[in-house]
Amino acid sequence: MTRQLIDRYDRRIEYVRLSVTDRCDLRCHYCMPTGFRNFEEPEDWLSFTEIERVIRAFGALGTRRVRLTGGEPLVRHNLPALAGRLAALPGIEDLSLSTNATRLAKHAVDLRQAGITRINVSLDTLRPDRFRAITQGKLEKVLDGLQAARQAGFAPIKINMVVMRGINDDEVNDMVEFCIRHGFTLRFIETMPIGETGRAATNHYINLQNIKARLAQDYDLIPGMVTGGGPARYVQVAGTDLRIGFITPLSQHFCDTCNRVRLSVEGTLHLCLGQNDKYELRPLLRAGISDEELKQHIIRAIEQKPERHEFNDKPATVVRFMSMTGG
């Protein structure tokens, strides 16, 4: 019988968000500071073999979902090969990818053939000049990547939009119409005070309940559901296939149903996005522990998972950048 990871608060942990790199080819101002270069060095990254070993152990303990994240995961060389290895592991039923899509046009087919079925794409604006201001990148690369993803057969394709007052909140309806036209799922996300950049971005914070109310004036919103292991609460635009999710870590936290941990590129298990609780796996792996010992360490780590974040009460708690944590 497969064991299960149950934390102190009776939450089943069955979802690992796996960062394969802390590097990114964009510089979104709420994620990574302009000019930041303090990346982990490749010798400090977990190798594909070490990653596979950790995820195999999680699979044996009941984990069913794995999402590849970064930084930007497509910066990691030969990512489709890793995806294929993870998709073949016992117990792993759902392998997905979060990406900025700037390199997706080149890799979409290989990633789909490797076993990734679902993707999330970060896209905060549909205006090229505004995209450059937010990310220092080119919008056309993302749009090309999205087209390639559709042609490769990914489903669903989810668009993640961080809504920021005075920056892109005037594009909410435009993004709804864009996703209706292209058959994408849309998810709005509140800014979070993760690191100095994230705390600065909360100056543009918007309670997504206000966005939902605004949308309800223009669209008939009915209850909706989307498969996946994430925290979004969904509605559907009546008369269309569009589902809209709201990810609300500040206005309506979802800590009581948290089912996930994050594994950083250097082998650190981050047990809560909004806390500093962590468990270092890389030193153990390179000290030669057995697979059974690895499982016991994972169980021990999950027992330390905190009850909830403190974004509202102690916004300065987390000093690491989002790119260092994993998306």
Image (cartoon, rainbow, N blue to C red):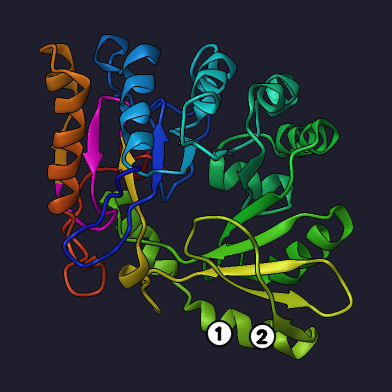
Secondary structure of the residue carrying tag 1 is helix
What's under tag 1, amino acid-wise? Asn
Quadrant in the picture for the N terminus:
top left
Q: Residue at (46%, 66%) from the top-left corner? A: 190
Q: Residue at (54%, 40%) from the top-left corner? A: 93
Q: Residue at (25%, 58%) from the top-left corner? A: 274
What's under tag 2, amino acid-wise? Arg
Quarter of the view holding residue 145: top right
Q: Do the numbered discs 1 and 2 sit on residues whose CB atoms are within 8 Å? A: yes
Considering the whole magenta stretch, tell me its main secondary structure: loop
| Mark 1 neighbour class, 10 Å CA radius: few under 14, some 14 to 19, many 20 or more | few
| Residue 278: in magenta span | no
For disc 2, the marked residue is 214
Q: What is the magenta range?
A: 264-277
- Pinpoint residue 212: horizontal percent, then vertical percent: 62, 82
Q: Going by the image, does 160 lie left or right of 248?
A: right
